[in-house]
Image (cartoon, rainbow, N blue to C red):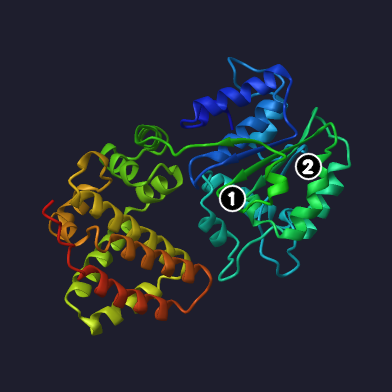
């Protein structure tokens, strides 16, 4: 991975490049931001730049032995650390290295739900266990094999169990001279504060719609219309945009289900709402969470649409057609409650609550919420 392959984030790239060029690389760096914006791609490009033996125009050359090993995911001084599910003898990252390489090849923007699918996590929540910290400490104690530095790329450090984080803390505080840690987090607020405070931090912002659309058309061969629609509703996440653009049928499915749900909710069609709750529950946890995220976005965007602020609306033309009539029912009197109800349902699903019960309860709450009358404005 080269810097030239990274969409956006030019200022962060410039700062990371300068560290290497000046020979002042911190022993622990944290890249944080929402999922899907290319943090891990940038971490890989940064690691390759550190190991590259022949920089060209501020980028790794891509052809030296180190670069080729990075591109093939087999540089002996690059160590990947990521959450796993303990079962069938699997306890640490290297037990799943083949599936990890599959993930990096197919989903380089690293949507966590895809990793859950790749490792068939089911209802289990992947984590980084204390065994992993012990393995990191053992590998860190060895000299670098062929490079000046051995680099540990830790994906989702917020998934570290507390005992794992505490065990690793001393090594991050007092690392070996040839050891670097690059942490890539989707939610750095969940990191152990003592680890967070010992990193040099770069908070990366969501990508612009132009960056996303350009990437989809140039690198994925997506048509201009589809790329623009996906970039508009991806909320700055390339991972989400790729999923939408490459699998538009899911977006259509979610859109149709949301529309019918809201129509039935307003009409108090309890029997049909029960059927819709069972239909959505049958999606499975990860897809259902994506549907709930879609519902949350539609409530938010319809509120914005109702406030007559089209310049910040992120609706597709098809969604906007529905919102012409639906948006007036999302207003300051119910938008907060509707958003909270959907968010709570997503949290319950994430925690493995019974999906049928959660979704039927949500349908009933949506019926109450969407029928809430708009507050009467005072005449002064």
**Viewer-side residue, 50 vs 107:** 50
First reached walking from the N terminus: tag 2 or tag 1: 2
Q: Residues within 10 Å of mark 2 (few under 14, many from 20)?
A: some
Q: Residue at x 27, y 60 (%)?
A: 255
Task: Name the residue that disc number 2 marks.
Answer: 172
In the displayed structure image, the side of residue 152 where residue 220 appears, left or right:
left
* Mark 1 residue crowding within 10 angstroms, few (<14) / some (14–19) / many (20+): few
User: In the image, 52: left or right of 102?
Assistant: right
Q: Residue at x 35, y 36 (%)?
A: 209
- The residue shown at (33%, 65%) is 337
Instruction: Give the farthest residue toward the front.
Output: 380
Q: Is residue 117 above or below residue 6?
A: below
Image location (x, y in percent) of residue 222: 34, 40
**Regarding mark 1 in the picture, which secondary structure is present there?**
helix
The residue indicated by pointer 1 is 189
The kind of secondary structure element at disc 2 is: helix
């Amino acid at each position: 991975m080269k810097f030239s392959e990274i969409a956006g984030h030019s200022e962060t790239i410039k700062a990371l490049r300068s560290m290497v060029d000046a020979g002042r690389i911190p022993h622990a760096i944290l890249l944080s931001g929402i999922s899907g914006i290319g943090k891990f791609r940038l971490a890989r490009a940064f690691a390759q730049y550190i190991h590259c033996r022949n920089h060209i125009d501020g980028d790794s050359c891509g052809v030296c032995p180190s670069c080729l090993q990075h591109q093939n995911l087999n540089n002996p001084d690059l160590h990947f650390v990521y959450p796993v599910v303990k079962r069938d003898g699997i306890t640490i990252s290297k037990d799943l290295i083949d599936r990890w390489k599959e993930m990096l090849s197919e989903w380089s923007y690293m949507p966590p739900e895809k990793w859950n699918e790749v490792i068939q996590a089911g209802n289990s929540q992947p984590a980084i266990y204390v065994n992993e910290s012990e393995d990191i400490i053992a590998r860190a104690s060895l000299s670098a094999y062929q490079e000046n530095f051995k680099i540990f790329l830790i994906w989702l450090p917020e998934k570290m169990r507390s005992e794992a984080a505490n065990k690793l803390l001393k090594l991050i505080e007092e690392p070996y001279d040839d050891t670097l840690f690059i942490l890539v987090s989707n939610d750095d607020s969940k990191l152990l504060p003592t680890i967070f405070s010992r990193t040099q931090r770069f908070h990366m912002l969501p990508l612009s719609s132009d960056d996303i659309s350009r990437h989809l058309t140039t690198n994925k061969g997506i048509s201009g219309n589809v790329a623009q629609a996906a970039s508009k509703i991806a909320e700055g996440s390339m991972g989400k945009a790729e999923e939408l653009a490459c699998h538009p049928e899911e977006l259509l499915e979610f859109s149709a289900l949301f529309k019918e749900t809201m129509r039935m909710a307003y009409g108090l069609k309890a029997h049909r709402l029960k059927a819709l709750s069972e239909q959505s529950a049958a999606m499975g946890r990860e897809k259902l969470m994506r549907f709930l995220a879609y519902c949350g976005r539609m409530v938010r965007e319809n509120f914005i649409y109702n406030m007559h602020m089209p310049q910040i609306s992120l609706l597709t033309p098809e969604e906007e057609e529905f919102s012409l009539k639906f948006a007036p029912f999302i207003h300051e009197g119910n938008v907060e409650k509707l958003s909270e109800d959907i968010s709570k349902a997503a949290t319950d699903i994430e925690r493995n609550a019974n999906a049928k019960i959660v979704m039927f309860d949500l349908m009933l709450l949506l019926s109450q919420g969407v029928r809430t009358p708009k507050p009467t404005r005072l005449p002064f």
